[in-house]
Amino acid sequence: MRKITFVGVEADKERFLERLQEVGVVHLRHPKEAAEPQDLVKTLARVTEARKILTSKNVGTTPAEPPEPLSGLALCSQRETLAQRETLLLAEIAALKKELFLQEVWGDFDVQELDALRQSGLNIQFFRVSQKVFETLPLEHIYHRVVGISRGEVCFVTASLGPVVLPVPEEKIPSKNVSIIQRELDAKTAELERIESEYRRLAAHLETLKRTETELTDLLEYRRAVLNAGAALDGNLFTVSCWSPLPEAELIAKIGPSFALHYFSEKPSDNEQVPVLLTNKPAFDSGEDLVKVYSHPSYQDFDPSGFVLYCFAVFFGMIIGDAGYGLTLLAVTFLLQRKFKSSSPFAVRFFRLMYLLSASVTIYGVITIGYFGLQIDRENPLWKLCLLDVSTKEGQNNAMILSIIIGMIHISLSHIIQFKNTRAYASLGWIITIWAGYFLVSGKMLGAPDNPFATYGTIIGLAIVFFFSSKSRNPIFRVLEGLNGLLGIVQVFSDVLSYLRLFALGIATVYMAQTFNTLAEGIVNGVPYVGWVLATLVLIAGHSVNLLLGVMGGVIHGLRLNFLEWYRWCFTGDGLIYKPFCLRKTQH
């Protein structure tokens, strides 16, 4: 990236910014307290909200007649009017439902007839109390009838020639009977359905809303650029500063010769936050989406997309580690791609990633003779492809060692990258320490003769860490920081051991698959006639759950080993995402 500053005549400012937006490659540098065109921000927010709501209302049905032409802002106004009415209706319906619930227990009667009875001398009163309170009321000499019990409450009516006085409040009867309340509820529900129908009618104009949203976004970016352009010479000149991934000569050629401009180019300083544009070949670009899950690389970082992608694929394959599951994922990916035929860049990258992960699971399953947890006969040709039999104690020990070695390779790569970027010699010390320490510890555990190369290698590695962990010229600080650097051995040790999760999760997947197979076999042998049906259901449900758990574990732990154990030693993150000042309308 190059920092380029343009200086031009104020009269050309708006025309120049229009052209810069048409070129669409620069990332504008706005001040920290950038001015915003508030009117456009609010309008765009309205359109975006309308687009999101109408997208959720779009049921995918084609209207019988072509929708009448409407502008984006007219659609927003109609949607807002419907939303206001919908909110009011929902509140009224909720109130009516509550009123109906309270009234239904008394039955459907005409309130005027109740008044007539009272005028003739018969006093009718309504009470609603809890069961415990009802049992304590003095009702022995009062005519009453219980009309309903619900949710621990007793509803009863008294009839007498005079008012009945009880130590509980009398319930006030609404002026509307159940039939009227129900009719009002039905009418408002029908109106709510008409509003939903209107929403679907407006949803037929989604493309119009999307175009309006895109146009407003372009206009907002342009207005923001105009408002935040600098001024010089009492407003006679304007200045625009930007980051460009293109060399200045190529950028000026794209802008054209029709402007009276002066420009100068600078390299970014060490403390500047420079936008980062990730550009990878198709074999690596799926890793960009994985990298962005955690943090965008900073300008001082390297682009880890390719490393993360293929390391994640290896980890994912080891965690599931069953060729049958791998082929299942491959089939599911193929069917999803056929169903959702999308040519968007994200969809292309996603399905490319899914095929890679499916292949990784299948390959690791083949070399570990894993096929839905089945016991494969030794005479089967598939055994010729087996390199690691995890069904034996020796094979499991080898799988554990393989996980550790993969972790050591992974973390060593991290230190190599750190050394390449920063010339931190302590990183080389850690690489020596990791490998020499492994051979030293493994030799001790196996009871092998002392390995002087491993012993001295460990000492030399730690010595390099001690002497190069500090850049201070003060000997006291250098010693203290060197000792502090040596404490990193605890972190290195724990990071390497963390890769044992690859073995642990992989063997758990194997054992769960075998367990479901054993359950199904027991059902077949123990349940006559329908045993095969029940066993098939157990196998489908069990292996589906096992595959789902494997995918979850593969994603979580596969990414975690990259983002925590690996990033810790070579990655800064928190980078600024490159956002080109461009016309999205043209792209749309």
Image (spheres, rainbow, N blue to C red):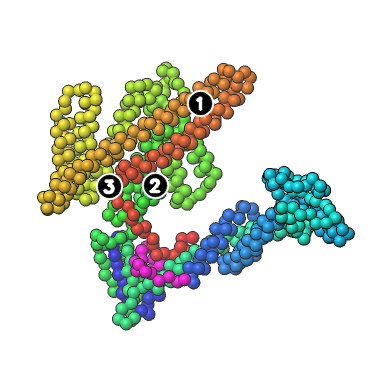
Q: Is residue 478 above or below residue 395?
A: below
Q: Which residue is at 41% across, 25% downward?
A: 369
Element carrying mark 3: helix
Q: Label 3, on which residue?
A: 570
Task: Report x, y in % for residue 167.
Answer: 71, 52
Q: Is residue 74 above or below residue 154?
A: below
The amino acid at mark 1 is Phe
Question: From this viewpoint, which residue is outermost toward the right?
Answer: 120
Q: Looking at the rendering, which quadrant does residue 70 occupy?
A: bottom right
Task: Report x, y in % for residue 437.
Answer: 21, 33
Q: Is residue 168 left or right of residue 117?
A: left
Element carrying mark 2: helix
Any part of residue 580 in sight: yes
Q: Is residue 37 magenta?
A: yes
Q: Looking at the rendering, which quadrant does residue 443 occupy?
A: top left
Q: Which residues are magenta?
A: 19-38
The amino acid at mark 2 is Leu
Task: Report x, y in % for residue 365.
Answer: 41, 29
Q: Which residue is at 39% across, 39% downward?
A: 557
Q: CA distance from mark 3 to mark 1?
A: 42 Å
Q: Is residue 585 left or right of residue 160?
A: left
State the residue in front, 372 or 450. 450
Q: Is residue 451 above or below residue 164?
A: above
Q: Looking at the rendering, which quadrant does residue 377 occupy?
A: top left
State the residue in front, 553 or 489. 489
Mark 3 or mark 2: which comes first in sequence? 2
Q: Is residue 194 left or right of residue 304?
A: right
Task: Report x, y in % for residue 542.
Answer: 52, 30
Mark 3 or mark 1: which comes first in sequence? 1
Q: Label 1, on which residue?
A: 516
Q: Label 2, on which residue?
A: 290
